[in-house]
Amino acid sequence: MGLIYHLIFLLMSEYQYYDFYSIDRPLTRDEREAIDDLSSRSHSSARRITFEYNYSDFRHDEEEVLSRYFDMMLYVTNWGTRRLLIKLPAEVVPYNSLKPYEAMEMEDYLHCEVKKRGEHILIDLVQNEEEGGGWMEGEGLLDEMLELRAQLLAGDYRLLYIAWLYCAANREEASAETVEPPLPPNLKRLDASLKSFMNFWEIPRDLISAASVASETIDTSAQQNLSSHIGQLSEAEKDEFLKRLLEDDPQVKLKLMKRLREFAGSKGTTNPGSRTLADLQEATARQSEIRLEKERQQAAKALEKKMKKIGLRQVDMWKEAHNQAALRTGSGYKEAVRLLGELKAYGKYSGDMAAFGQQLHVFLKVYGKSQALQRRLKENGI
């Protein structure tokens, strides 16, 4: 009965889950006390706080809380809202490079917004299912996507492109002549964090696969080895970075990495993007056809392999079906019916249903009086 009561509770109640996370630094004692006072529904640690509600709401401005204390926020509800909010330092990330990925035409349903808030830039990715999405528990989801912020700080805008493309593809009024924003490299190489976001927003893989055809694949390992460029810093720059380090500037590492990336340069940079939405939709349709045909071929090969195996074992399978039915137990009948189902499938595949019918007639003469077995056979179409 406990499970039934739990399901009734879920159906009758609301579910809202907030997860705030501080990546760049741990929270101070005063900050932890301040955020713990925001709600009695909180669970906090040195870097995060979560809030879960069933009958009430979070009565504070999420963006304000994020801007003051945290770097990322995830929000999910049982009525279909799925939101990811990312804070970036405006001094490190160029606002004008992010703005082309903004998609605000469907603000109430689906949008990717890029906005300035003080010294920060906020990336606001929101999806509101019109008829409510499937139940999604929020716990643990943000952990899978924390790396997305580091990618944006490194100039990797795949997340933004994916979000823009999904927004554009789902806008009924979108112009077929809408041109894509700058196309980032390595769309063919999606890491776990990007795949987690796609699962979070339920973005079709075919859509991204089609867009990735024109995306350059580059090796970023040379750019990641930034320490080799420290010698290119001027003495004045080194002194300034050391000074900021002593002043506990939380952004000093990001600013240093940005400067070293400038020395490292970037091969295969983001290209301007030239395809229209119509081009991308057509490519997606082709990609879907290719995937479905591949899946059909794989399924056919798997079926052929399975049927060959049954063909070699059918004598033994009939004997085992008899042995299991002879046990006169629920588990025995269940296994017997499973074997009969596979033997029937082989009869259809091989075109010899007459042989299956003869063997089944013999089987039923012995065990067919059992009502439990009859019920299982009927339920399985045998």
Image: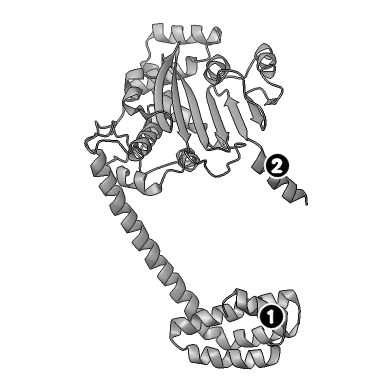
Residue 318 tag number? none
Reply above or below: 335 against 5. Answer: below
Which residue in the structure is indicated by mark 2? 9
Query: In the drawing, does residue 217 fall left or right of residue 311?
Result: left
Residue 241 seen from this side: yes
Report the amino acid beneath label 1. Leu
Per the image, label 2 sits on a secondary structure element best described as: helix
Residue located 25% across and 36% down the image = 175
Contact (Cβ within 8 Å) of mark 1 with mark 2: no
Camera-nearest label, 1 or 2: 2
Q: Decide which of tag 1 and tag 2 comes sooner along the chain.
A: 2
Q: Quadrant of residue 90?
A: top left
115 or 269: nearer the eye?
Answer: 115
Residue 373's disc number: 1
Point out residue 335 in the picture as x, y percentages from the top left corner.
66, 76
Disc 1 residue crowd, few under 14, some 14–19, many 20+, Cα 10 Å: many
Residue 154 seen: no
Q: CA distance from mark 1 to mark 2?
A: 37 Å
Left or right: where 215 falls relative to 9: left
